[in-house]
Amino acid sequence: MATLQQLSYAITISEAGSINKASEILYVAQPSLTSSMQELEKEFGFRIFHRSGRGVTLTPEGADFILYARQVCGQYQELVNRFGNAHNLKKKFAVSAQHYSFAVKAFVETVKEYDTLKYDFAIRETQTREVINDVATLKSEIGILYLSDFNRSAITKLLRTAGLEFHRLISCNAYVYIWSGHPLAHNSSITFRELQDYPCLSFEQGDTSSFYYAEEILSTAEYSRTIKANDRATMLNLMKGLNGYTLCSGIICTELNGDDYLAVPFEADSVNESSVMELGYITRENTVLSSTGELYITKIKSYLGVND
């Protein structure tokens, strides 16, 4: 019978990419890890890992196995956190989000109310698909993303398949996010035509990228100049260095991003109609948030001015 320890070993090996690295992380001898995985594969009747000189990779069956192993280990951790007497065991709380400064701000305010000696906290600003995967596999308790008329059907289908549900926080119109020295910074509104001479900035969505995964609203518009980035700091540097812009919710945190940037209302036209962004958070279906998760959502609602 597979043990929680074996499942935990398998998860660590899949993340490390090699048994050698996993051995160092777990402080377990490599032969013991190899033997443990062989027993696990024998019990279930399929290979979990492809082994080569470069390390290990998951087989298709192994990828599914790790998905369920994460859920089992995550549920056990929740059980211990809620009902166990392991006072020395650190509780965990993690959030995965698209690149929203308000999500980071709320996380900071949440962490301030806890003793970090007793908690392992994590926040991941990542690609849309990873936000969904992290919550589905219990890597994160909460995910932050948005829906629109364009992506709603595709994203909702992904959530439903993964056993997740979307909770609306707030709806907002599109804004053009630029630095304060941009030639259009003093406009009361900005049209798509006025943006033609400047590069549109967007976050990379990986090999499985899709219009539906884009963090920027109006992702299907015809942009003559585009540049992709993979983190918020780089995005801000491109805005300032190249007069780049991105289309966003208009909800920005100057405390984290600085006051050199501003959001100007996007003015729709007959070709490029505006669209409403419905910001919200995702959780596993039929799951009650932890007390830390509830506090985090309370902090977000307070920052966004959302009244229950």
Image: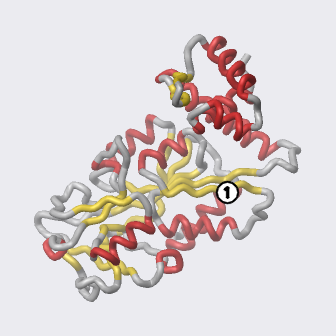
Q: Quadrant of residue 183?
A: bottom left
Amino acid type of the residue that numbered disc 1 sits on in the rendered structure: Phe
For the point 56% across and 32% down, which residue is it? Answer: 67
Report the front residue among 102 and 65: 65
Q: Residue furthest bottom?
A: 186
**Looking at the image, which residue sits at the far left?**
270
Q: Residues within 10 Å of mark 1 (few under 14, many from 20)?
A: some
Identify the residue under disc 1. Answer: 121
Query: Is 225 drawn above or below residue 164 in the view shown?
Result: below
Image quadrant assignment for residue 278: bottom left
Residue 181 higher or lower than 36, as above or below: below
SS class of the residue under badge 1?
strand
Instruction: Determine the residue positioned at 16% across, 59% down.
Output: 222
Question: Quick check: 52 above or below 190?
Answer: above
Return the residue nearer the eye: 230 or 250.
230
Q: Is residue 98 left or right of residue 186?
A: right
Number of marks in the image?
1
* Residue 125 coordinates in the image, percent (x, y): 50, 57
- Quarter of the image with the N terminus in it: top right
Q: Position of residue 171 (x, y in %)?
A: 39, 65
- The coloring applied to the image is secondary structure
Figure quadrant of the C terminus: bottom right
Q: Nearer the viewer, residue 242 or 132?
A: 242
Residue nearest the viewer, comparing 232 with 249: 232
Q: Who's the residue at 73% across and 36% down the image?
A: 76
- Residue 207, position as x, y percentages in the image: 35, 42
Classify residue 197 as left or right of residue 185: left
Residue at x 44%, y 35% (from the top left corner) = 161
Residue 190 at x, y percent in the picture: 22, 78
Q: Give above or below for 263 relative to 106.
A: below
